Amino acid sequence: IDNILIIGCGNIGLRHLQSIAMGSINSPNIFVFDPIIPSKSVLKRAFKSHTGLELNENLKIEVLESPFYGDEPDLVIVATTSKARDELLIQLVTTFKRSKFLIEKPVFSSAKNYQSLEPFNSSNVYVNYPRRMWALYRDIKRETQSVRGPFSMSVVGDNWAPGTNAFHFLDLFSFLSGVTQYNLVGKIHSVFPSKRYGYFDFDGLIECKVQGAELNLTNR
């Protein structure tokens, strides 16, 4: 990978930058776009404030005024807020036809926008669900593959923000059980503002029951 473009450098975007800076990728060109980060000096201050680390001066980083710069990147990381993320993704996949994409969830805010992406090559688009890469869950999957009988998974707790984190457990359920299509039933007890301004979360239950597998997600 020679060229990496990071769009959105809030908390999650800065963590992506940190992983690239500390990873094994050999000196890629890193391009960063965020409307509130106009310069590399501002990026360095934000990076130190969030991670407690100094940004390596040897990294080849360029802060862009627009995400649509000249060369087509090898990897595009989309870490913007979820509002209008789907519309941005549609613009990106139509512009960077050979790039790989790593997208934060939720990718779509409406079924209409999901359908708008269908004509394009979505095989190059990956949603960032890292749990299926963790050794713990890979070990669980290996150990349970030979076990006969129904698969059941439950997540029960307080204040674990199901409005955003439920996506991770739904993907983990698919990974561990092998179930890829299912219907969800929800029982929402209360809705309240989340920690992030302008967003909401809820207390309640999300259930899924299919042949041979069931999932229960409860936030109290």
Image (cartoon, rainbow, N blue to C red):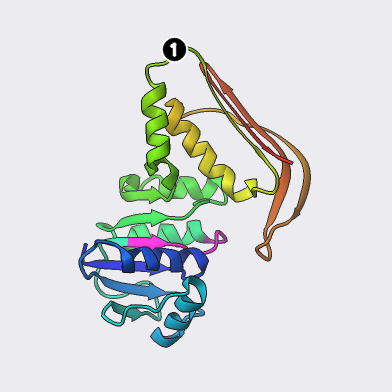
Nearer to me, 183 or 129:
129
Task: Report if residue 82 lies within the magenta region.
Answer: yes
Find residue 74 and report its horizontal and vertical position in percent: 25, 62
Quadrant the N terminus occupies: bottom left
Residue 105 in picture, x, y percent from top left: 50, 52
Quarter location, residue 58: bottom left
Between residue 184 and residue 165, name the one nearer to us: 165
Q: Is residue 92 above or below residue 219?
A: below
Q: Taking 5 as reference, is 11 left or right?
A: right
Q: Residue at 42% across / 33% down in the picture?
A: 175
The quarter of the displayed image where residue 210 is located: top right
Q: Position of residue 92 (x, y in %)?
A: 37, 62
56 shown above or below 5: below
Residue for badge 1: 148
**Residue at 68%, 61% in the rendered image:** 195
Q: Is residue 83 magenta?
A: yes
Residue located at (54% from left, 63% from top): 81
- Residue 154 pos. (x, y %): 60, 31
- The magenta-colored residue range is 76-84
In this rendering, position of residue 27 left or right of residue 207: left
Q: Quadrant of the C terminus?
A: top right
- Name the magenta segment's main secondary structure: loop
Amino acid carrying mark 1 in the image? Arg
Q: Residue at x 28, y 57 (%)?
A: 97
